[in-house]
Image (cartoon, rainbow, N blue to C red):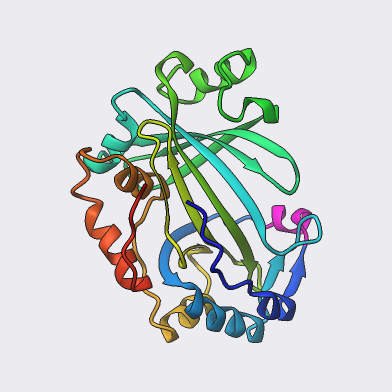
Amino acid sequence: MPDDNHIEFAPQLGRLGTITLGEMESIKLMNRIDTKYLTDEETLVAVLDDAAEAGYMALEADGSKISPYDSVYFDTEGLKMFSDHHNRRLTRQKVRTRSYVNSGLTFLEIKRKNNKGRTKKKRIEIPASEFNDFSCDESACKYLAEHSAFTVEMLSPAIETIFRRITLVNPAKTERLTIDTCLSFKSFRSGLETSLMDAVIIELKQDGRADSPMKRILLDHRVKPVRVSKYCIATTLTMPGIKSGRFKPKVRMIEKTIHKKITAQ
């Protein structure tokens, strides 16, 4: 369900400094703390203005400071990965393919969360043609079996998520910020589609020992931390009848933030 009524952020991005992918990869946050936030595009304009004043830099890749992403989340027939998250299982996993649209690169990615709340991500590059189905790729199937609790025979596409991402780094290079806008979802199981309209999901990855200018900026604009999973929100919105009571308050929170009702069709 595409929605073209979005702010482009060109003036704000133009005021931000630039960091390259090579420079970004050199930033090691050894004592990392991840925090997610929820806001809307209008508030994001002010946040980006303040980020520019504070000297933040934006990742520029392929000549753009906004990168389109396309992901497919895989799950079992009974949606075990969704259910594990819903049931507050401390150790859980997500399996997805992700296409970095501007570069043309596609990866199989496995995210594992342990019982201490730490998330580790492993990935292997795959051909773009395997974005929806990597079952015939021997190396990808072996990688999945080695790094997850699942085999390729257990999984099939569940949800596609499409969004645009802005990535910022502070001058001290002690924190990274991913800002996801234009979020839209499609369920492979129900065929329903929806979008979060002008909602914005921000994730702050910071060195726990360092001061965070961005935390102060977000606080100044009344942007508060929230625990939210794009996969779980998408599944809740596009799979009628699924047990999703834990995530429905999150949907209402998003609707309250953007002052709009979210529907799927």
Residue at x-position 60% and y-position 30%:
131
Q: Where residue 123 sits: x, y (%)?
A: 60, 34
Relative placement, left or right, of 101 versus 42 is right
Closer to us: 114 or 16: 16
Specify the segment rendered in magenta: 20-27
Pick whichever, 21 or 8, lies toward us: 8
Residue pictured at 36% horizontal, 24% vertical: 76
Residue 236: image x %, image y %?
30, 46
Does 34 lie within the magenta span?
Answer: no
Image height of 51 relative to 134, above or below: below
* Residue 163 x/y as whole percent: 55, 54
Rendered view: 65 above or below 118: below
User: Residue at coordinates 33% horizontally, 55% vertically from top-left?
Assistant: 263
Q: What residue appears at the point 35 percent right and 36 percent down from the top-left corner?
A: 92
Question: In this image, 121 relative to 252: left or right?
Answer: right
**Quarter of the figure with residue 213:** bottom right
Q: Nearer the viewer, residue 156 or 27?
A: 156
